[in-house]
Amino acid sequence: MSEHHNEHTHITPFKTHLLILGALIVLTIVTVAITWTNLGVWNTTAAMVIAGLKGTLVLFYFMHLKFDQKIYRVMVLLVLAVFAAVLILTFFDYLNR
Amino acid sequence: MHEHRDDTASKIGMWLFIFTEILLFGGLFIVYAVYRYRNPVAFHLAGEELNVIIGAINTVVLLVSSATIAMAITAMQQGKRRLSVRLLWVTILLAAVFMVNKYFEWGAKFEHGLYPGSDFLYSLSQGDVLFFGLYFAMTGLHALHIIVGAVFILFVIAYIRKGKVHETRWQLLENAGLYWHLVDLIWIFLFPLFYLIH
């Protein structure tokens, strides 16, 4: 039965999951705290950078990308690139109206 | 007995499905970005109507639930089947907590006459209509994913009971985890974009 399984299964220890959870909660507190300060346009930028950081932690640790074969990271990157391309092309239009 | 299965194919299939979900919500995020760019003041003021406390609590609830399902996978891989099932039940419980919060949050909006298609909503500016339209559509679609994710996890628990998911065969459990983390991932972006507009 085990012959079907990955020869080298990486098991993420509980400790790692809890550390990542701690980091995610701290980042959530930071992003709420930033809302109370006035940074002008940088408020939205900061919120998106923090969300991106949290998303990366979820993808790499909880969703195991860090320990998986490279092909999964390449696929995720491609999908994010498609999203970025559509976002940028859309704004090329709206910013120049 | 020879078993026919391909865990890698199963996992890649799950990721491909997740990519379609990312592009679905991605499209909605682009619609949001354009309308916010064109109605910055209305989006700012309408965003302040949302309850930051409930939003923040639900964010933490989902983050913890992501950790518990990730730990359920670890427990299963280590052969701790009962612990794994318990962690899955905790995940479902947290999904229920999220939905109860959502019920109170939406309920308060409805009481103020704020719901899709309401007369009060249409008496507001176009920017407000767009903001609340996107708010109900995007958080509603996300809530639907919470329900689907919880049902998915229930199926996994049933499969563990039947002995079809165990310490050397846990791809279905991992796929449920991937789906659940996706739901968390989407909320990570929904929360600042709707509740924390400065």
Image (cartoon, coloured by chain):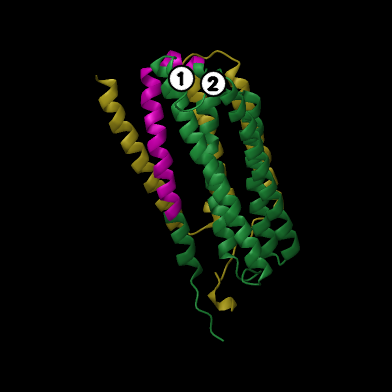
**Residue A2 in the image, given as x and y percentages of width and height:** 59, 76
Residue B37 covered by magenta stretch:
yes
Q: Which chain is yellow?
A: A
Image quarter (top left, top right, bottom left or bottom right) of the N terminus of chain A: bottom right
Chain letter, colour green: B
The tally of labels here is 2
Which residue is disc 1 drawn over?
B119
Measured as percent of width and height from the top left, residue B159 is found at 62, 67
Rendered image: mark on residue B113: 2
Magenta segment: B17-45
> Same subunit under labels 2 and 1?
yes
| Nearer to us in this view, B68 or A52 | B68
> Distance between the Cα atoms at labels 2 and 1?
8 Å
Provide the secondary structure element on which disc 2 rests. Answer: loop
Q: Position of residue B51 (x, y in %)?
A: 61, 23
Dominant secondary-structure state across the stretch colored magenta: helix
Instruction: Give the answer, above or below, for where B17 lies relative to A83.
Output: below
Camera-side residue of B18 and A57: B18
Crowding around mark 1 (Cα neighbors within 10 Å: few <14, some 14 to 19, many 20+) is: few
